[in-house]
Image (spheres, grey):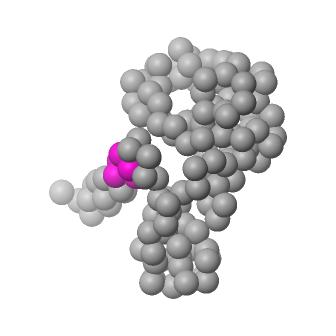
Amino acid sequence: MSDSGESEGVQDAGFDDWVDAAEEGTAYYLECPDGHGSLPPRRVCPECGLTDLERVDVPETGTVETYTVTHVPTPAFEDDAPYATAIADFGPVRITGQVVGTDPDVVEDGLEVELEITVSQTTGERVIGFDPLVR
């Protein structure tokens, strides 16, 4: 097996572990002593290079910082359209995901959301999603 294949397996396993934790309601990020959050979890803080990282729970709610609504997707996601993809602020980390459980045209900056793992209608794979607290 090549080094690149092994690296990909490690990355996939880490993402799958994180998605499993999020599904169980125990999503986490890694934080260095200086308070920098890292997601996806890494062995070294991307801000300062420290390696003494602590696992910290992701806050229960976040706020949409920016979003886009896709009406004409790539063929890989045609059954999901239209859909809203957002970046939500969860304290020290920002997470990108699909807004679920509401009409994508009502998504707006400042919308309060909860992290929710959902399944893509097109691919059948688990994806990171956000469930709005107010519809």
> Foreground: 113 or 80?
113
Residue 41 makes an appearance in the image: yes
Rendered view: 133 above or below 56 = above
Rendered view: 4 above or below 96 = below
The residue depicted at 64 percent of the width and 65 percent of the height is 92
Residue 94 point in image, percent of width and height: 64, 55
Q: Magenta stretch: give its range.
A: 15-21
Q: Main secondary structure of the magenta part?
A: helix
Residue 42 point in image, percent of width and height: 45, 68
> Foreground: 61 or 92?
61
Q: Residue furthest right?
A: 109
Residue 38 as seen in the image, left or right of residue 63 = left
Residue 94 as seen in the image, left or right of residue 118 = right
Rendered view: 95 above or below 74 = below
Residue 53 point in image, percent of width and height: 46, 78
The residue depicted at 47 percent of the width and 25 percent of the height is 120
